[in-house]
Image (cartoon, rainbow, N blue to C red):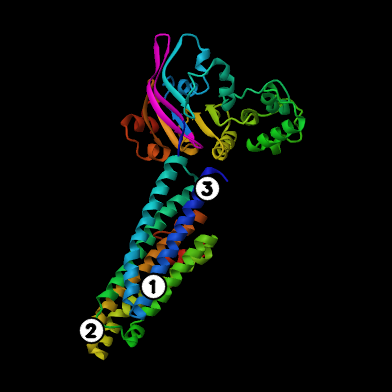
Amino acid sequence: MTHLDSELTMLKADIIDMWRLVLNQMEKGRDALNNFDRDLAEEVVENEKRVNSYELKIDKDCENIFALFQPVATDLRLVLAALKIGNNLERIGDIAASVADFVLDADTDFNKDILEHTKILEMYAVANEMMADTLEAFDKEDTRLARTIFKRDKILDKIDEEALDRVEESIKNYPDQVRNCLLVLSMIRKLERVGDQSKNIAEEIIFYFEAKVLKHKKKKKKEGDE
Amino acid sequence: MSNKIETIDVNLHYGDFHALKDISLGIPENSVTALIGPSGCGKSTYLRLFNRMNDLIPETRITGKVLLDGENIYKIKATKIDALRRNVGMVFQKPNPFPKSIFENVAYGLRVNGITDKSFIEGQVEKTLHQAALWDEVKDKLKKSAFELSGGQQQRLCIARALAIEPSIILMDEPASALDPISTGKIEDLIFELKSEFTIVIVTHNMQQAGRVSDYTGFFYLGSLIEFGKTRKIFTNPSKQETENYISGRFG
């Protein structure tokens, strides 16, 4: 293994560790909401610092690799992708922490019917699955799996679009839970962004392995085999 | 990490020419330290302090201290200079194998040091050829002349020859500048592998090479040490403007 190879292996390992941490943050955020577990919500808020320090470390490692090794071809694409994936993961980490913050803003536990009706738990399930699958796509060099991400983002978009009506209905059904309903609406608006970040990450994975740029391309081209 | 080599206020004159000016620097053990700078900046002269090779140049005057494992090597008895040079191996710019077989090139240092045990010599030759990442390429032709090897192989042979007498320090003066990119890559990988066992100091004109192989970098200019630090720092955020100008190719 060359010196550059060992640096790139470490970089990849750091990205995967960060990925797992952020996915874990998302899962804990969902559990904190579902079980109204304030301690868990606080843990998620607190852990955001760790996510941030991962991003800084990956940024610094990429800067060093550019300066010291002048990577080319696949190596270059890995370092470029690492920078952007790290950035997108950090934003998902922010979202996980913001949702946990909203949980802490609630006075009482969230009525299960509201969580069900607004589809926020479904949203969490889809978002977390997208994150787990992008991680697997990156780790296993599976660009076909990465291409499945784009379609799933539409599920999140739809839940987001319907959220206003569903929250309004929930407020009517549970007038004593107005505050929580509004918090759920805020959470849905945040979680919708996880789909966009995951799409960005999937684009970077395809760029890294196939040298194809999918950014700003029409949807059909992204999902198709080209 | 402790310093294997330390120089304190070293000045060196060749006749009237002031080649090294007040150089104080510690070189950490089991690491690779690169010395960079434009031609004539003093980096090779500084390197040759550590095995007292400058002594061979007439009208050389050296002041200050050069400590190796804490001992001032300019205060040792003349009879101990051989031992110093056994401890401090050197690899030069152009591969310079002896006109002997591949095997005898590596065995040479052992033989001149009075070792006659055949199986020990064979073991040592094989070990160091492995260390120099050359064994697989030469194991079936150890009796052939070293001149039959390619330039890159000859240079790895010279590294094996230096390693055979088990030095603790290896000095390399432009070890890859006469080689093609593939051979250069092999030498660089080798340097990276060897640092766990040796303290390596390398002079190079190739700044990217310094970036790739070294843990620490010293930038020399007009006989002065302008900046010394971790290679990562020097190549991403040097403290001195002169260093930045040099590493970014804007002067030198």
Label 1 element class? helix
The answer for how far apart the CA atoms under marks 3 and 2 are is 54 Å
Q: Helix, strand or loop at disc 2?
A: helix
Q: Which disc is residue A178 wearing?
A: 2
For mark 1, what is the residue?
A: A28
How far is disc 2 from disc 1 in space, using C-alphas?
24 Å
- Please say whether residue B212 is one of the residues in the magenta stretch: no
Dot 2 crowding, Cα within 10 Å, few <14, some 14–19, many 20+: some
Helix, strand or loop at disc 3?
A: helix
Left or right of residue A214, residue B182 in this image: right
Question: Which is closer to the viewer, label 3 or label 2?
Answer: 3
Characterize the magenta stretch by its predominant secondary structure.
strand
Occupied quadrant, residue B217:
top left
Report the disc number at residue B133. none
Q: Which chain is mark 3 on?
A: A
Measured along the vertical axis of the image, is residue B181 above or below residue A20?
above
Pointers 3 and 2 in contact (C-beta within 8 Å): no
Q: Which residue is mark 3?
A: A6
Residue at (31, 31) in percent of width and height: B241
Who's the residue at 36% across and 60% down the image? A50
The residue at 26%/77% (across/down) is A183
Decide: marks 3, 1 in contact (CB < 8 A)? no
Q: What x and y, as percent, mark residue B144? A: 75, 27
Q: Earlier in the sequence, mark 3 or mark 2?
A: 3
Labels 3 and 1: the sequence-earlier one: 3
- Residue B98 in the figure: left or right of residue B205: right
**Residue range highlighted in magenta:** B5-32
Do the dots labelled 3 and 2 sit on one chain? yes
